[in-house]
Image (cartoon, rainbow, N blue to C red):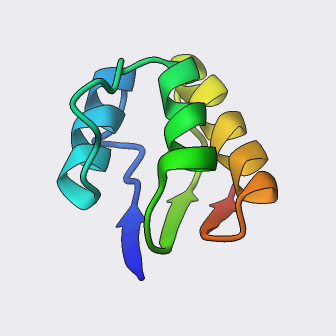
Amino acid sequence: MKKLAIDGTLVKTPDDFYALLGKTVSLPAHFGRNLDALWDFLTTELTGELSISWPGKAEKKMADIKKLLADAARENPKLTFIERE
């Protein structure tokens, strides 16, 4: 299982998140670095298991990504999302 820990003090923009995700898993060449592409990847294209933890609050502009991660984890049993406020 691959693990990704999000540090909210370092990951402040969607680009920061996508860059970190790309260092953890192999994103497809066609990955669009947007919410639709992230949803598709996490729910249908993810190979292997992935655990993402995100302690603390997210920047307001990151709230949509954090919500999508929680929703995708409910859809895909290979994805675990651990959120702590």
Instruction: Give left or right: position of 20 versus 59.
Output: left
User: Image point 48% across, 55% down: which residue?
Assistant: 46
Instruction: Give left or right: position of 24 versus 69.
Output: left
Q: Position of residue 10 (x, y in %)?
A: 28, 42
Q: Nearer the viewer, residue 62 or 69?
A: 69
The C terminus: image quadrant: bottom right
Tell me: residue 54, above or below residue 48.
above
User: Image point 43% across, 64% down: which residue?
Assistant: 47
Q: Position of residue 33 (x, y in %)?
A: 36, 21
Instruction: Give left or right: position of 70 versus 15.
Output: right
Q: Residue furthest bottom?
A: 1
Q: Is residue 39 visible?
A: yes
User: Image point 28% across, 43% down: which residue?
Assistant: 27
User: Image point 42% across, 44% down: which residue?
Assistant: 8
Q: Nearer the viewer, residue 5 or 9?
A: 5
Tell me: residue 30, above or below residue 47.
above
**Number of marks:** 0
Q: Position of residue 25 (x, y in %)?
A: 29, 57
Tell me: residue 47, above or below residue 42.
below
Tell me: residue 67, above or below residue 32.
below
Q: Nearer the viewer, residue 47 or 10?
A: 47
Q: Is residue 13 visible?
A: no
Q: Position of residue 18 (x, y in %)?
A: 32, 34
Instruction: Give left or right: position of 53 versus 4.
Output: right
The N terminus: image quadrant: bottom left
